[in-house]
Image (spheres, rainbow, N blue to C red):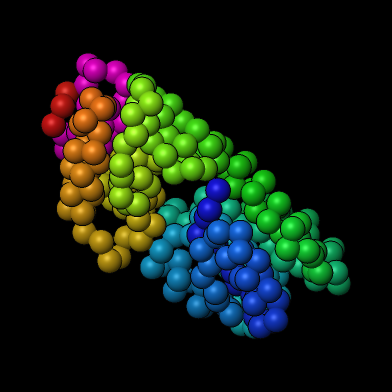
Amino acid sequence: MAATILVVEDEPAIQELISYSLRQAGHAVFDARNAEQAMEIVNNALPDLVLLDWMLPGMSGVEFARLLRRVSRTKTIPIIMLTARAEEGDKVSGLEIGADDYITKPFSPRELLARIKAVLRRRSPAAADDIVEIGGLRLDSATHRVTANDNEVTLGPTEFRLLHFLMTHAERVHSRSQLLDQVWGDHVFVEDRTVDVHIRRLRKALEPVNKDELVQTVRGSGYRLSASQTAAMG
Ligand code: CA
């Protein structure tokens, strides 16, 4: 399961090693050398997870984690703290401030990837599921295939992410701005109208297999994916 990961680490060699390992594993990586850079990145696009060095120049990793936890937009982002052996005693307070896990340096790329996977699964089990099936529509996130009665549905990358989010959070209404945050991961450069455009494309792609009615408009609120046919259509 590929994720967007923000790596906040001031030591270039460690930063490079981590970024390389994450990219090799299929993740998208944002690099920051300090908390200020990291905050700029987070303000532009919400990552799926933050790897956060404990000791940073300027604002410490712990202070940055506290800051993320205080703001509603960022308070549920999974955080894994990176600590040096000498800071072991600080682990407890790292978990107290709301970090999901911590890793002691030096660590192997394999251990790092395993911890990341575990945290992502724990924090968002639905998103980590490889296969979701609702109302006869089946989405396999490992192979990026969407099918209905063995008929393949062809989707663009944005429509795929949109459908994946709606299917893993079905029966709930999502506003356009929530969808922008969750699917585009970036509130700043995309207009609300963009959501409508991609919803239309998604429905069009689902029409040939008669599944377009799963994607429902909830007037004045947003969109929902539901297997129930009783909802008002837009
Ligand atoms: Ca450091």
Q: Residue furthest front?
A: 151
**Residue at 44% of width from left, 60% of height from top?**
46
Q: Residue furthest left?
A: 234
Coordinates of residue 106 in the picture (x, y in percent): 81, 69
Residue range (magenta): 212-231
Coordinates of residue 113 in the picture (x, y in percent): 68, 56
**Residue at 34% of width from left, 34% of height from top?**
152
**Which is nearer the eye, 215 or 191?**
215
Coordinates of residue 182 in the picture (x, y in percent): 39, 50
Q: Relative to 119, does residue 216 appear above or below in the rendering?
A: above
Please state the total of marks drawn on the protein image. Answer: 0
Magenta stretch encompasses residue 215: yes
Q: Relative to 71, does residue 167 appear above or below in the rendering?
A: above
**Residue at 60% of width from left, 42% of height from top?**
121
Residue 173 at least partly seen: no
Q: Is residue 86 left or right of residue 222?
A: right
Residue 2 at least partly seen: yes
Coordinates of residue 217 in the picture (x, y in percent): 20, 33
Magenta stretch encompasses residue 226: yes
Q: Is residue 138 left or right of residue 2?
A: left
Q: Is residue 219 left or right of residue 137?
A: left
**Which is nearer the eye, 128 or 81?**
128
